[in-house]
Image (spheres, rainbow, N blue to C red):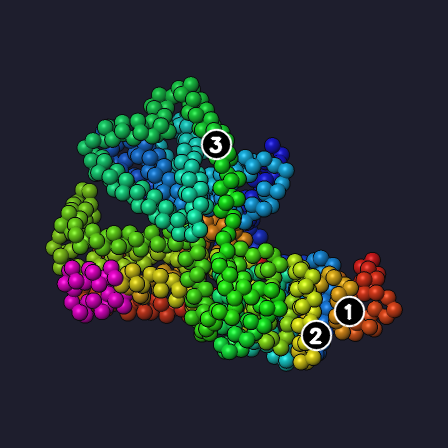
Amino acid sequence: MIEIKNVTKKYGDKLAVDNVSFNVEDGEIFAFIGHNGAGKTTLIKSMVGIHDFDSGDILIDGMSIKDNPVECKKLMAFVPDSPETYEHMRAIDYINFICDMYDIDTETRERNIKKYSKLFDMEDKLTDTIESYSHGMKQKIVLISALCHNPRILIMDEPFVGLDPKAVFDIKEVLNEMIKEKKIVFYSTHILDVAEKLCSKVAIIKNGKLVKSGDMKKIKGDKSLEKVFMELEK
Amino acid sequence: MKKLISLIKACMTSDMNLFKIKTKNKKFSILLPIILAIYLMFTIGASSYQMFEKLAPLHLEYIILSLFIFGTFFITLTEGVYKASSLIFNCKDDNLLLSLPIKRRTVLFVRIFKFYIFELLFNSIFMLPAMVVYVIFIKSISVTYIILSIIMLLTLPIIPIIISCFIGAITSSLSSKFKYKNLVEIITAIVLLLFIFALSFKMSDFIKHLAKNATSLNDLITKIYYPAGVYVKLIAEFNIIDLLIYILVNIILCIISIYVLSKFYFKINSRLKSVGTTNKVNVSNLTIRSKSKTKSLVKKELNTFFKTPVFIVNSGFGLIMFMIFVFALVFKFDSLIPFVTNKETGLGISKDLIMNNLSILILALILITGYMTSITNSVISLEGRSINILKSLPVKVETILMSKIYACLIITTPILLIGNIILFIKFKISIIESILLLLLLVLVPLVSHFIGILVNLRYPKLDADNATEIVKQSTSSLVSVMLGIIFAIINIGIIYAAINHISSILLLIIEVIVYIIIDIILYLCLINKGTKRFNKLSV
């Protein structure tokens, strides 16, 4: 379970995240939506331990990310908005590097690397250096390395950007599989129709403040998520 | 023109961020590099003062100015040859700039202008003290001298930068044709540097005879190097026509060079960007092995090092020079002795003192190499945006930072070890002294690595356009190199003062103990302050 408790983050005098609180339960796919610069990435980076925050707390399975960053991170995988990797590395070395950081045994990683590289059509491209890849291929490598260590919580920032339609379809299948296993998927997106179909919960952030949070069905009612979002943006 | 100014402003913004003081902490951060730059200028001023003192009675002060101009040209050229290719070609903002409706020539001009601004600052550190000391000796200052000096200061980097840019274009063009571009780039840069270095050794023959043949040396420099000749001539006898010709020559040189370079620029840049793919190997045929976190992090660091040519050349050059000195000591020991013993041209240290303390000579070599090879001053900045990967991983910050130190030790230790063993055999160093020196060859670079990483954590540059900006032009590299020089000077000074009073073994034991203490203090500093700074890094 992820508990966001009154989290506030400032950049100088500017409030990027303003007293935000919500929970994400096990077995939920949670969509986090908001306009550009609303504070989505800041909150996500705080959740995965990249950013410090000024007040409040973020609990991962009851552990504070501030007090137990390493233990919390062991449970999570993070897919950033732009595929940040070590460009000079071969893809296979990068995935192995990430697996080493999560202490994944050889057998498990071998199985998962094969499984996910086949799923994303990357099985014969892993010996190339990442710098030779297109944006979408880099994103696939980030996804493979995130999924390879069987994370209990998958946190993604705009994961579908740059992916081809087949990869988008495949990743949705993977996310559904994770939910069946009572894992957590939390992601930010601007593709509202995908979020509407895929996610059970949603949170909408505007200018750093949480304006709506809860069950997808309750929040949107008879309307589309896009319409609800546009009304809140007015 | 408006477009050009906007472009220059945009390209310079990230580099000049340091100078936009906003917080108290920033004010403190900017103080250290300024103090160090002033210290360096003061040292250069003091050295030039001594040179002026010798030449003033002969009324030959102007020779020092031409020497400094030539020296600055040489330093800028040495720096420039391996900086140019990465500062001008294959930059991070290529996609943005080359897609804008501006001429490629303009993009090239902006890149060269950025290069020029940094070299101008760098040159000023050397030239300004000499110009000021000249005024002190002449005891008069004219408006003409001030105007001439300003023009000279502004135009001095132009020629070495143009030469560097052409050499950079040739090396980039050459490396772009090969599969292993980085390797070709590294080899060419090292060969070029060694060539310039060998040339400077030849130049030292002239400098040695400075006092005796001052006028002929000046004639030589002013004939070889046009700016030096013009400056000295105009100081002695001002002539507006000569000055205008000089300015015009520089402007025409710039225009022609940019025009010629822009003809090849796009082609070379495109070729450099094409990254080859390997033969397709299916994942089933790959051997997958797991490693410990530290081993894996160290491997990643070494990968970054060996895939960044400017990083290798910059840090590897000190190690290459170390090996050259080792072989020089082995094969040319007797001819090297006068350099140290001669009171006029050398350091004036007695031959007996050296012969009785050969282990201390090796220690001095370790100190110089250790402090000059500051690899860690770029390791944080080189992470760039990928710093977020490290920060999101379930690894202690301490492990991440220490893995960077281990990787640097892996790079420096083997070379220092081989060099030391060769010297132990040549000079028949006792076992106790050898053991102590072996300890020091790890302990001394360790101090340098700790300082480097701590300085880089204080002055990170995570948004650089290319590795050269980080390795060669960042505040972090300037501060850590300066601190290294200061540490080395202090340590060698203490050794020099103590060697006549205590035995070399005792001195080595004290050095080992002191360095263990310094390493522990710096380690604790890294674990406490360094970790906090790392956690605050954000892109």
Neighbour tally class for label 3: few under 14, some 14-19, many 20 plus, Cα within 10 Å: few
Circles 3 and 1 on the same chain? no
Residue B261: image tag = none
Marks 2/3: CA–CA distance? 59 Å
Residue occupied by mark 1: A197
Kind of residue at disc 2: Asn
Q: Residues within 10 Å of mark 1 (few under 14, many from 20)?
A: few
Does residue A132 lie above or below B218 as drawn?
A: below
Magenta-highlighted residues = B418-440
CB atoms of marks 1 and 2 within 8 Å: no
Near mark 2 (Cα within 10 A), the count class, few <14, some 14-19 or many ≥20, is some
Q: What secondary structure is marked by label 3?
A: helix
The answer to if B434 sits in the magenta stretch is yes
- Pick the residue in front: B504 or A68: A68
Does any portion of residue B50 appear in the rendered image? Answer: no
Q: Residue at x 32, y 53 (%)?
A: B318
Q: Which residue is label 3 attached to?
A: B260
Most extreme residue toward the left, as rendered?
Answer: B352
Say which chain tag 3 marks. B
Q: Which quadrant is home to the C terminus of chain A?
A: bottom right
Amino acid type, label 1 = Lys
| Labels 2 and 3 within one chain | no
User: Is residue B163 magenta-colored?
Assistant: no
Q: Residue at x 63, y 81 (%)?
A: A62
User: Which of B336/A168 is in front?
Assistant: A168
